[in-house]
Amino acid sequence: MHGRDESLRLLAEATAAARAGRGGLVVVRADPGSGVTALLDAHLSAMRRTGLRTHRIPVLPPHGRTTLSRGALPEWGAPALVVIDDLHRADDETLLALHGIAEGLRETSLLVVAGRHRGASPDRFALLERNALVHDLPPLDDSAVRALLTEAVGGQPPEPLLRLARGALGNPWLLTRLTDDDRAAAVTAWATGLAGDDTPLLRYTAVLDEPASVDDLAAVTGRTPVEVLAGVERLVTLGLMAADAGMVRLRHPVVRHDVATTSVGLRGSAARALAGRDAAPEAVAAHLAHAPVDAWTVAWLADHADRLATEPTPALVTLLQRTASWLPPGSPQLPPLRAALAEALLWSGRIDEARQVAASGLAANPGTPVRRRLRAVLALAAFGEMDPVSAAAAVDPERVDGRLPPRLAVIDGYACLLAGDLTGVERAVEQAAPAAAQDPLVEVYLLNIRAIKLCVCRDFPAALELLDKAAALLDVAVRDRGQWLVTRLLRAVIQDLCHDRAVLDTVEEARPVALEFGVGMLAWLRTISALASLNHGRWDQALAEIDAALAEPDQYGLAGPLHAVATSILLYRGDLPAARRHAELADRAVGRGVALFYEQIVVLARAHLADVEEDWPRAVETVRTLVDGDVGVHHGHAVAAVGVGMVRIAIRGGDRALAVRLLAQLQGLISGGSAGERSALTYCQALVDGDVDQLLVAAQEFAETGLAFSAARAADDAARALAESGRPADAKAAYQAAIDQYTELAASGNIQRAAAALRAFGVRRGVTGPRRRPKHGWDSLTTAEYRVAELVAQGLTNREVAERLIVSVRTVDSHVSRILGKLGYSSRVEIALKFEERG
């Protein structure tokens, strides 16, 4: 028997004691299906083979009578083993007889072993079990489950079977049924046989959402809550159910699945009962999706489909499809249900199907409200695919005297935005604005459109205020998954432009909806994530995001910026051939839709590559295209987004006048409302002025805001300026700070370029290269940790150390903590005392 060695050993030891004159009563308790009968049979057979007398007392249906029921004890002889299975079914006379003989067994050579269901009337057996050795049979462990399945399939069990087995919770009977062709029927028969009169409760618990409430079960079964609770208690004692704080579920996932599969006929009545008590429409729809369509279903959908379609579940889509097929052509109820189906398919990310349903619905010449909904679906499908031309074409037939109805006008406004037509955006906003007070959906669209315009003009506080209003409306007044996603992605864009680390959390909040919707919205999210991860030093995460986006058949015009981000990271890491390949692909990519607002990312990568290759004329000319306003949908947006990197390239390319022009543009565009923006302006001004002190200030500020790469690059620039001015010692200190941070980022390309530039001035890092460090002691410290220890030993505070090394205080705190751990010290004082003794 798999997994029962310990139980068999216990029974064997009890039997050996009985043979030695120390008999007794053993009660084996277990949940149904746990294999008590098989265990008792195995032990009985083993003892019989040893020559021991064995007796098996059956419990006879229907009244549970046994040979003990007559009161007179059988002549068993001694030594002997007596086995009584299914003791929970035995009559009272049998239990009384066992009570009478239990204490006397201790002085005999007789062992009585009884098996019963653990939860069956525990009070009935309490007194008897005080005089017994009680053994609770546990579920099978993982190794026993695998062995049992290996035996069942005749080899290594496949992973799907192992996953299914986890839902049996180690129950041997259920595990042996997993490979049966008629498993659902067999499991249901077993469970309902145990449940008896509580079978309806068992079945409805299986079909309701898990966990089910007592009130819902009362509604669908037609019982009172008190009656439901009593039935739940009985099913819990049988090991079939679990309950907690008024919420109920079937204990074994396999049982729940199989009973639900065989109880599909209850879905319709469950839906009606839940609807009658105003349950969530999503719960009602989940049942109707599996029930036959009828007039009640159609009437219910007519009242709820429009709202449900904005946040569809797979069950709702199935229900709408089945209902639309059930209604006869020409039914007045069919057009609005088709519109709801098209919307549900759209927000489920099934764009092609949504487009087909909308097109077929339009071919049936529906009334104006439905027609406009279907055209909106076509336009939004095009919008999701970053196709502004098709989006505009979808709504254009609804124009009357050059004007669109408000809901189509705001969609047209998005189409104009994607095409870079800001005049068209103004026209659409003007047409839709009067309806915003009465239509919260129109207001949400308008708020997001205005937020985009403010974002382009870099009025971030005003843009965030509008996004907050849109989010509030989406929470309380209107449901629209597309606009919800747009608000989150716009917020992430602004957070990234402000160098706010919260951008990464916003991206993850939006990701589940973007993954479900897919198409261009997912590509946009991945582009935002890649840029944010680049800016915050999470380059592996950025590259993983890029790989995921480029693995899709279509990047919806965003391949250019995605390849451009990869180009920059690979240049930082010193992989010039791969960077060139990505740069070439970025240049060849054709942008569309939202990608038009990321053209400057491609231009920056192009300039960056020319800078690394020291092709100064090409680098400077690329910067000039930005300064002259030849890049991006909106010049200000393009300049502000990449201007910091471009100023550096212009200075390195020897065109200070161009850098001055670019700086003036940045000063007019960047308000300095965030710490990251202020540091960027300080850095650019310091580059133009050749002000080493301000470069070091910028490096420190970047470090404090968590922009490690920007801090490293500013320290790198300061080191070069110091070397040029004949201050090699100071140059080496700044250089080392830059190298430490580049090392943390694995920016080997920048390390090599910085080392080459500084060597020309006689500034060298010293002996470098990988070595195997011990885990403890002074030799275990990294270069950065050793320098921190040295400054701590000099009596500097963590803030003073941070200022000296041009890193954040938080970074120094982390270094000090690691130093103490590696050296086994408990305080900074020990670092100072032991530094000179380190040998």
Image: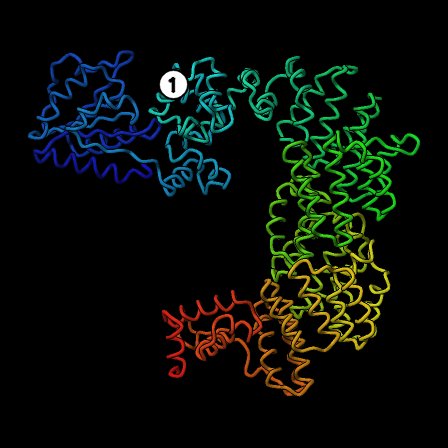
Frontmost residue, 719 versus 240 = 719
Question: On screen, 683 above or below 386?
Answer: below
Frontmost residue, 798 versus 414 = 798
**Residue drawn at the location 68% of the way across and 24% of the way down:** 305
Frontmost residue, 30 versus 716 = 716
Amino acid type, callout 1: Gly
Label 1 sits on a secondary structure element that is helix
What percent of the width, then of the height, locates residue 275? 57, 18
What percent of the width, then of the height, locates residue 331? 76, 14
Among the 4 quarters of the image, the one containing residue 719: bottom right
What percent of the width, then of the height, locates residue 170? 38, 35
The 10 Å Cα crowd at callout 1, few under 14, some 14 to 19, many 20 or more, is: some
Among the 4 quarters of the image, the one containing residue 374: top right
Question: On screen, 431 above or below 213?
Answer: below
Res 585 visible: no
Dot 1 corresponds to which residue? 231
**Residue drawn at the location 46% of the way across and 24% of the way down:** 213
